[in-house]
Image (cartoon, rainbow, N blue to C red):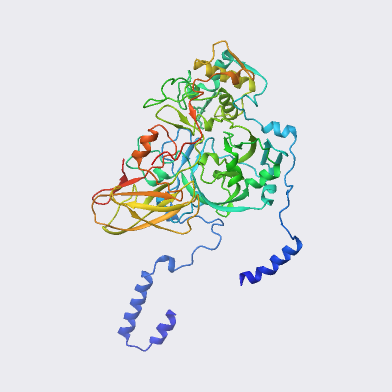
Amino acid sequence: MRFDYLAPAICAAMAVVPASAEPRHYAFGRTPTEAEIAAENIDIRADGKGLPPGQGSVAQGRDIFAQTCAACHGDNGQGLLSDRLVGGFGTLKDHNPVRTVGSYWPYATTLFDYVRRAMPFNAPQSLTDDQVYAVSAYVLSMNGILPEDAVLNAANLPTIGMPNRNGFISPDPRPDVR
Amino acid sequence: MAGFSVTRRRGLLAGAATLLADRRAAAQEDAPPWMRQQGSPVTTPPYGVPSRHEQTVIRRARVALKFPTASSSGTPLQDLHGIITPNGLHYERHHAGVPTVDPAEHRLLIHGLVDRPLIFTIDDILRFPSISQIHFLECSGNTPEFRDPKPNWTPQDTHGLLSCCEWTGVPLSTLLAEVGVHPSAKWVLAEGADAAAMSRSVPIAKAWDDAIVAYAQNGERLRPEQGYPLRLFLPGFEGNMSIKWLRRLKLGDQPFQTREETSKYTDLMPDGKGRQFTFIMEAKSVITRPAGGQQLRDPGFHEITGLAWSGRGRIRRVEVSTDGGTSWRSASLQEPILPKCLTRFRLPWTWDGGPAALRSRAIDDTGYVQPPREALVDVRGINSGYHFNAQQTWQIAQGGAVSNAV
C-alpha cells in the first residue's frame, strides 16, 4: 500500500533528475569576510600560530592577578575556590598527584589561549591581549618557569620549555585492559 | 443510565429498592475521583510535562556545587525505561553554564585548511540533506570510581553522565565537502559559543566518518542545555568533544592543544605519563534495577535490567552475575541493538531474600569484554580519572537494601 502510493512519486522525481538529486555543491552559506574570520579566529596553537601582537610583563601580571584572579585561585595561585595553578612538580607518580599549569601542562600557549577565551571566570574575554600576556607571564613566574623580569610576547611565548612537555603519550593505547 | 435502572425497578418491593439505591451510592463513592469528573482540557499545558507524581525523576548533581555553571548533573537512569533519554533528563556537563543563544544571530564558520571558507546561518544548515541517528553520549568523567566510591551511590550517581537520544542534523562530511578540505588537514578544532568558548581537536577521520552537526534531539530542536541551536555530535566519543553551541570549525594540520585536551580529559597513568587523545568510550554496562538506593520488598521474582553500550560498535552480549562475578548468565537484549547506542538488557531472577551481589559485563562486537575493576586499576592506577568502564556491582543485603559495593 505504502509503496504503491510512493512509487509514482519516486518515478516522477527520477524523471526530472535522472542521475542524482544531489548537486556537487549546495552553495548554501556564504564566503566570510577576512574581518569575520579574524573576529572568531581566537585559537592559539602550540607553535604560537594565532598569537596576537602585544606584550606583558611579570610585574604587570602580578597586579592583574591580584585584582582579577586571586579571589578564586588564591593570592599565590595555590588554589582557593577554584583550581590550584602553581607547583606540584614531581608529584605526577604520587598517590595524590598535583596537576597544575606548572607541573602538568605541556604548552605555555595553552595558558594564553585558555585565559583569553575563558578567564576570569566571572568576566570571560574581558582582558586585553597585553593583559593576557602579563597574567600568563605571572602564572608562569609563580611556577618558576619564567624569571621575575620576563616580558612575554608572540615570539617568546611558544619557546617556553614547559616541565611536563614530554609527559604525554598518544596515540590511544586502548584496548589495554583484559 | 442511573435514572433508567431506577425507573425500570419501580414497583419492586420497597425494601429491595432501598437496598439497590444504597448499593449504587456505595459504588459511585468507590469510583476514583478522576472517573467522576472531566479531566484537564487539551493543551493544558501546551507543551506536556510528566505527571506530578513523577517529580522525583529529575537530574541531580552528585556533589555540592562551588561553581554551578562549571558543573554536571546526572540522568536518573534508575527511573528510566527502554533506551531513550527524555530531553529534559539528558545529563548536563557545562564549563561555563548554558548560554542563551539567539538562533537568528548564531553562525557556524568553517575555515582553516579549506578551499572555500564558509559561514552558515541556522537556516542554511537546515537546508542540507539531513540524517537521524540514535546514539548514546557519555562524559568521560562518568563513573568516578577510581577513587573513593560511596556506598550510597545510585545509578544516577555512578553512571548518570550518560544519555541516549535520536540526533538529527547534517553529516559533517557534507559540510566538509562544501568547503573542500586540503589534504594536509588532519584535525578539526570545534569551538562553542559559551562563556568557556569550549574547544576540542577532532581527528579528521572522525569528522569524515560519522560526525553530525546536529540541530534536533528526539524529534524537537536541541534543548539549550544540549547546545541550542547547533552542536557537534561525535558518536562513541567522550561527551566533551561533542561541542555544544557550535560556532566554529577550523581545519588544521596538528591538534590545537586546548586546555580540555591537555590539563583535562587526559588520563594520568601510574608512571606519571598522561594519555592524550583517548576519545573512544569503551564497552560498559550497568544494572539500573535493582540498584543502589533501592529496596527489594519481597523475595521471589525480580527482573534484573540495565543498559549496555560501546563507543566501538554494537553490543553483542551482556552477562549478569548475582554472586559478584563467580557465575554468569546471558541476559536477553532488547531490539534494536544499534552501534554506539544504549542497549537495554534483562534477566529474570528469583531473589531468595538473602545477600546477593549483582554485576553485569558487556561484550561488544569487537569481542572486547568490560573488565572487572581490579583489572582496570591494575593497568591504569587510580589517578587516570576519565574513562572508568569497569564492571559495576550492587550489593543486596539480607532484607533487600541495595547499595554500591565499594
Residue B249 lies in quadrant: top right
Residue B211 seen anywhere in this rendered image of the structure:
no
B118 and B107: which is toward the camera: B118
- Judged left or right of residue B359, residue B126 is right
Residue A157 seen anywhere in this rendered image of the structure:
yes
B356 and B364: which is toward the camera: B364
Report the residue that reaches farthest toward the top: A149
- Tally of numbered tags: 0
- Judged left or right of residue B353, residue B104 is right
Q: Residue at x 38, y 86 (%)?
A: B9
- Judged left or right of residue A176, residue B183 is right
- B254 lies above or below B2: above
Q: Position of residue A20 (x, y in %)?
A: 71, 57
Q: Position of residue B123 (x, y in %)?
A: 69, 48
Q: Residue at x 56, y 53 (%)?
A: B133
- B277 lies above or below A98: below
Q: Quadrant of the C terminus of chain B?
A: top left
Q: Position of residue B72 (x, y in %)?
A: 47, 39
Residue B391 lies in quadrant: top left
Q: Position of residue B256 (x, y in %)?
A: 59, 31
- B128 lies above or below A31: below
Q: Quadrant of the N terminus of chain B?
A: bottom left
- Judged left or right of residue B186, residue A16 is right
